[in-house]
Image (tube, rainbow, N blue to C red):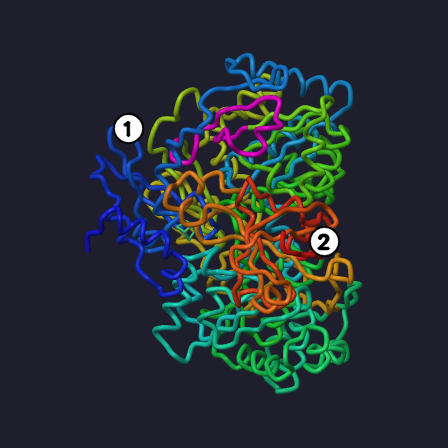
Amino acid sequence: MKLTRRDVLKTAAASSAMVALNSSFPMVEEALAAEPDKWVKAVCRFCGTGCGVMIGVKGGKVVTVKGDPNNHNKGFLCLKGALMPPIVYAKERVTKPYIRKNGQLQPASWDEAMNLVVGKFKIALKEHGPTSIAFYGSGQALTEESYLASKIWKAGFRSNNVEGNPRLCMASAVGGYVTSFGKDEPSGSYEDIDAATCFFIIGSNMSECHPILFKRVASRKQADPNVKVIVVDPRKTNTARIADEHVSFKPGTDLAILNAMAYVIIQEELDNPRFYEKYVNFMTNDKKKVNFKAYQKFLEDYTPEKAEKISGVPAEQIRRIAIMFASASGTVSFWTMGLNQRIRGVWANNLVTNLHLLTGHIGKPGATNFSLTGQPNACGGVRDTGSLCHLLPAGRVIKKASHRAQLEKQWGLKPGTIAPKPGLHTIALWNAFSEAKIKAMFVLCTNPAHSLPNVNMYTEGMKRKDNFMVLSEPFMDAETVKYCDVLLPPAFWCEKRGVYGCSERRYSLLMQAVEPMGECKSDIDILLDFARRMGVDSKVIPFKNVDDVWDEWREVSSATPYNFKGMTRARQEKESGLRWPCPTEDHPGTKIRYVRGEDPNIPKDYKNKYWYYGYPDGKAKLWMRPYAPAAEEPDAEYPMVLTTGRVIDHWHTGTMTMKVPELRRSFPKAYVEINEDDASKLGIKNGDNVELETRRDTMVFQAKVSDVCRPGLVFVPWFDANLMINKLTLNAFDKGSKQPEYKICAVRIKKA
Ligand code: SF4
């Protein structure tokens, strides 16, 4: 069917509904196509679903995109993905370097800009040492860019102050996987969706945040009416609208619900002792190994009736979902920011995994515990390459002397080069920058002046004259541009080459489709130039281009269970994504980890079916994590809960999606979503201006009254730079993962 441009505009307005209805998106592609001269293989620039795209190029310009039929998305794209081309040519593109003079950004040459940057970093290093400089990167940077920046800092400058925005979205998932399995990253793959008979979706609005994956879940349910969907979310989102059970609960009490589900599973004898007796250790919260009976005793505090008192979820519903989860032939759990952005994010992750370890719904087709990623390369770029302050590449940690020694050997460094103390995590880093203890900060491919929680605190720090920030940012209207001292123009998405690794451990190559605009350079070239000018030893940073960096990363990973050795550039150019471990050039990549015959890290003659090799005894850990309240509970002064998130048409801080006319028209500004009963009590009608006040700031939003939020809860999307909800959110963080609690804070509201 051919569509007109007008049909596409109508489609934009109805995009949320389309996802819920499981519509087919390639028709959008047909409408936009302008007969390109060539198609170039790449990956969508937005969410962690990591859909493969083909970029249509005509006369050296991007004119359209379509889904890659050979990647996991089988040619489908959601509306955001299908509407990317205008972003490349937005009038706000930064196409030359700028230096701030007398408070204004003034055009400069590359030499002037880089000389200033290097001068500031050299002074900071000389006068205050390696802990006074920092790199703040992104889950949107290419794998090679994150790896290179991390190596420049950790090996070149002996500074572990390497952080990035994945700390704000994925750190609790990392903490969850590492504590449960000894290794990060999901063990299953997207194919598990096609074999599952039960989906347990908690803390995730998949239909809006991971539309193409949700489409696959909805198709599975449509194909087999016996497939059950459980959605645990205090909002009745589009995701919840296909649920057999929508569990609405008092925000922050899901830990009690998850423990109560485990209690019911054991009571109903739906647990799987044959699995957990062989492959699982039961652990107390203070890391003592105990037996199953001790776990049962712990769960006595979480009978469905006790959990009902904490969470507001009827005991009968807890029983029903527990039985549904355990009695299915295969259950896949999905979660994302609703669990991760919490002060008990790691515990919440552990408790979902517990249900899989207790029932044996793990490590077989259609049964897995799957954390979804928000950004296109948080897994592949930052987690895997170890580009955070406590990590080294491929699952190694800075604190372990043996891991540092391995890396020093692989990198050809003198023993003792890598500093033994982890750097500052994101919140501590920006606190230190605000206090001018960090003197020079390199920010790449992210917008912290919009995305940090309690953001006023940090933008005040960014205004100081005695610290220095260089920013590589493609768009002049990104909030952080207001505060940087030097602005560098990076090549954007299809203007450069490199790799994105999505939620299912799949790494896909983005091939350069067009030349960078104006004076833009790829971030790899910017970082290589920076390292050279800083005088970093050319033996430490010997790379000439992005492919050299990739080849070193393959080597560095090959001594670990990550193992990318078989993912050569030649293969990546030919194939549409490969999943690690992929140890040899003829290896097809790994669908399921920790399973003999599937995971190449397990010898074929290993005696057992499963081997959780992250722990020396090969067993996973089931943790007894108690319920604990949120950092800021509602009270008499601030009686409601504020939560934040995405809407389908916008992504992150809106710097890209707000440049697509169809998407901007569909959702032009942020709003506050209020439950109809609360609205009626407060005399608020749809469209009224409503004042939201937290202990941090006060803002006014237009009301959207509906049944989506439960009573007592309000929701505000965070994409809008003119209505930045992060002025109101809280910067309390999980003490394990250091991820902030964006999802819950106390608020009072009134008609403005
Ligand atoms: S689901 Fe995510 S990765 Fe796929 S097209 Fe949409 S935004 Fe892009």
Q: Is residue 2 left or right of residue 425?
A: left
**Quadrant in the picture for the N terminus:** bottom left
First to last magenta residue range? 472-495
- As drawn, 532 above or below 554: above
Contact between marks 2 and 1 (CB within 8 A): the answer is no
Residue 93 or residue 136, whichever sits in front: 93
Q: Mark 2 — residue? A: 734
Distance from mark 1 CB to nearest ligand 1 atom below 8 Å: no
Question: Could you tell which of marks 2 and 1 lies nearer the N-terminus?
Answer: 1
- As drawn, 394 above or below 137: below
Q: Position of residue 432 (x, y in %)?
A: 75, 34
Q: Is residue 71 left or right of residue 560?
A: left
The residue shown at (71%, 81%) is 303
- Disc 2/disc 1 C-alpha distance (Å): 47 Å
> For residue 175, what is the image quadrant?
bottom right
Q: Mark 1 — residue? A: 60
**Helix, strand or loop status at disc 1:** loop
Residue 460 or residue 685, whichever sits in front: 685
Q: Is residue 477 magenta?
A: yes
Q: Position of residue 425 (x, y in %)?
A: 70, 42
What's the residue type where badge 2 is placed?
Asp
Q: Is residue 252 magenta?
A: no
Distance from mark 2 CB to nearest ligand 1 atom below 8 Å: no
Q: Position of residue 725 (x, y in %)?
A: 61, 47
Q: Residues within 10 Å of mark 1 (few under 14, many from 20)?
A: few
